[in-house]
Image (cartoon, grey):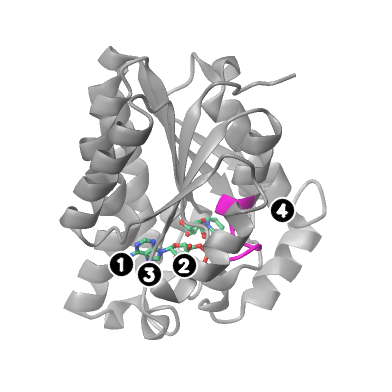
Amino acid sequence: MNLVAGKNILVMGVANDRSIAWAIAQSLASHGARLVFTYESERVEERVRKLADTIPNSVVLPCNVTSDEDIEKLAGALKEQFGVLHGIVHSIAFARTEELEGLFVNTSRDGFALAHDISAYSLVAVAQKLYPLMSEGGSIMTMTYLGAERAMKNYNVMGIAKAALEASVRYLANDLGQYNIRVNAISAGPIRTLAAKGIKDFNSILKTVEEKAPLRRTTETAEVGDTALFLMSHLSRGITGEVIYVDGGYHIVGV
Ligand code: NAD
């Protein structure tokens, strides 16, 4: 079954083959989507291009989400090359390592602003410039974590940014629903990726999930990829403004 055949889908947030965005790209590609990848900076460009080369007909473009100019250029390039966009996968976050340990109360003003700019506002900025290209309706999704709703050790300012991200999902869904554009988030269980490396004691978080989650195992990126495929497809047409948990059920368990 080709769930997303004929759809042009933008995938933002591939850094390497462990990135959640990469697993999402594989699920989408295996169901016929035409993919556009963006990369953050020249530092990761070559890696992203190498990965994209394994997916036929995919396109690679630059976009650092802290730059309005980059996002505008991306919108221009997508309009020129595709005309119509059907999906956006936003799988981007950043906070300084020193803000991801110790006490949240010590968060600096600029560390707070930076984490929010890259991890939450970027979804709004990208949706703002790209939704006009979704003239046939569309689906936008982002990645969040349980730390948005619970105070989790060392997640700190990223939890606050994820709370802002989840609220942005609801407001964007309410704005864009009139154009048949849906906006949702996947709340994934902890997965060992480059971004997760920044979080102190990540191994003990994984161990707790293995012990406590109803499925008694940690989350695999492919599980997130397949839920993203569902969100990008016609099958999820009635769902918007939602946070879907792909965490082996961990969030339902009492501590
Ligand atoms: P990752 O490091 O592979 O992906 C993070 C991506 O953000 C990278 O591709 C990086 O280049 C990009 N990025 C950072 N700053 C950017 C900028 N200024 N402009 C453009 N891109 C920028 O790690 P990941 O775990 O795949 O993270 C993807 C998303 O999933 C993040 O939003 C993360 O918070 C979320 N998430 C991760 C986990 C986990 O345990 N790994 C769990 C739940 C949610």
Q: Residues within 10 Å of mark 4 (few under 14, many from 20)?
A: many
Q: Residues within 10 Å of mark 3 (few under 14, many from 20)?
A: few
Q: How crowded is mark 1: few (under 14 residues within 10 Å), some or many (20 or more)?
A: many
User: Does the magenta portion include 165?
Assistant: no
Would you say residue 220 is visible in this rendering?
yes
Residue corresponding to mark 3 = 41
User: Does the magenta portion include 21?
Assistant: yes
Q: Which mark is residue 45?
A: 2
Give the mark nearest the N terminus, 4 or 2.
2
Distance of label 4 from label 3 (alpha carbons): 28 Å
Tell me, yes or no, whether the two marked residues, 4 and 3, touch with CB atoms within 8 Å: no
Residue corresponding to mark 1 = 115
Would you say residue 248 is visible in this rendering?
no
Distance of label 4 from label 1 (alpha carbons): 24 Å
The answer to whether the beta carbon of the residue marked 3 is less than 8 Å from any atom of ligand 1 is yes
Q: In which quarter of the image is residue 42?
A: bottom left
Q: Nearer the viewer, mark 4 or mark 2?
A: 2
Q: Which residue is drawn at 51% across and 78% down?
A: 198
- The x and y percentages for residue 24 are 61, 44
- The x and y percentages for residue 210 are 78, 61
User: Label 1's element?
Assistant: helix
